[in-house]
Image (cartoon, grey):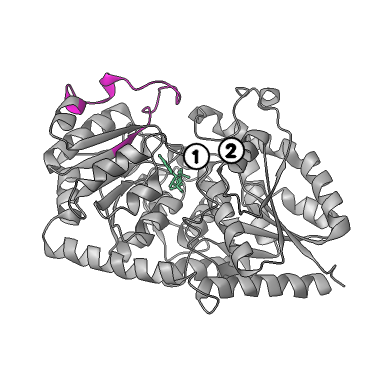
Amino acid sequence: MAKPNLHVVLFPFPAHGHISPHLNLAAHLHQYHSNLTVTLVSTPHNIAAIRSSLPPTSRLELHSLPFCPADHGLRTDSESTEDLPRDQFPIFFMAMESLCGAFDRFIAEASKQSTICIISDMFLGWTLDVAHKHNAFHSSLLGMSAFGGAVFLSLVMNLPHVDSESDPFTLPEYPEVVIHHSQLDVVILLATKTDPPMLFVQKQLSTLYKTDALLINTTEYLDPVGIGMLKKTLKLPVIPIGPLVGSSYSQILPSENESKIIDWLDIHPVASVLYISFGSQNSIQKDQMLELALGLEASKRPFIWVIRPPLGFNAKVEFKDEWLPDGFEKRMKEQNRGFFVHRWAPQIAILSHKATGAFLSHCGWNSVLESLNSGVPIIGWPLEGDQPFNATILVKLGLCVEVARGNMETSEVGKEKVADAVEMVMGDNEKGRDMREKTKEISTMLKGAWKDESCSSPKGLAEFLKLIETVMDN
Ligand code: UDP
């Protein structure tokens, strides 16, 4: 018999794009199921940042798991991927398993009082053993699109992929999906069957086949093919509960210059500004940055560009003039055409401002959902992982045009292509009008998904809680 009270324990991978949907889920759990205890666990820095960002009314409990980055050869402040050098990502992924002992102790204690449901990140598959040990319900929250997640899972489970004879190729589980090498990042493209980090990731992802349920940050009308693909391969309850965006819990990293940015947007006409960002943890090559800048200049449209150091530069380094064409920043500022944000922008506030007309994005799934939720069409430049496949579904739905792919030295980007794409999406032409119209329709549907308990995502959440009851009663 299940213990009377349910305690939901959320455990995201420590990266902004993973923590944010878990926080949004916590907010919805409280909104629709006020009797639940919900705790989010993470490393000390992340817990401190989340604690300081939560509204005073929040009932989310936070639990800190001790983590010593230096034990793994990481800089002492490495508790998230934002400032982490790219070559340290694999170490960081593997270091997460060192949280197992403290997590086990937390679950052991909590399970004395309540029935436990662990909702963990797919990169923390080892939490399944902890759940089994303490007779807890275990589920994973997929923060990618279902289509991107299905393809990413298959790519990682079926290494290697470098074979010049097979470009494009198809996936064993999904012969209908055609993959081009240009859609693969360097890690997936060059991974062998014996790379320790890839073996580690494979092991984590393999728990997706054994967990009790999969929650996905998506919706049926946006991502039906991918949901079907995951149901077919995983053979377990797959429950879409998206979009997990924009709740009062999720503004973890405040941007210092938010009011200046909003003032700048306020003086621009409706849907006239292009917003450019490659997410919380990735960058492009310096040469690509120069070409992008020239394309933006040629487009003649105002823009806000979040500039992170290009690849090869320390992620914490201050801005350097050499990253942009000669005099570019000065020219753009003088013409009041360019607003440059160094490092971190208030993305949701920018996307929801009426002056923002398009988003040149790396197609990280949170960025995609935030953009579509605000009715802003996307100019896609996917870089890695699931992003190219997120872009695929958007292009098929007429919500996005792809302008470039990848950030390898060989990945091509042309200034003319950038300027043409901006004109197509933002200009007065049939294709652009159609794309903007379709994006508005999707925005209405996404906003409707969480409106009240009769809507698709609260229903998905109720189905999930019912499933926990059934499984734990047996
Ligand atoms: N983000 C932000 N400001 C920035 C960069 C990113 O607020 O300057 C947020 C963005 O709103 C999104 C998340 O960070 O919620 C990025 O997640 P996404 O899945 O788009 O990409 P990732 O960073 O995981 O590659």
Residue drawn at x 25%, y 36% is: 339
- Which quarter of the figure is the C terminus placed in? bottom right
In magenta, the rendered stretch is 305-329
Q: Main secondary structure of the magenta part?
A: loop
Q: Is residue 249 magenta?
A: no
Does 458 sit left or right of 120 as displayed? left
The dot on residue 49 is 2
Looking at this view, is 179 or 125 the one in front? 125
Looking at this view, is 377 or 374 the one in front? 374
Residue at the spot of label 1: 253
Q: Is residue 317 magenta?
A: yes
- Percent x, y for residue 346? 40, 43
Residue drawn at x 85%, y 54% is: 133
N-term mark: 1 or 2? 2
Q: Secondary structure at mark 2?
A: helix
Residue drawn at x 34%, y 60% is: 394
Residue drawn at x 42%, y 67% is: 447
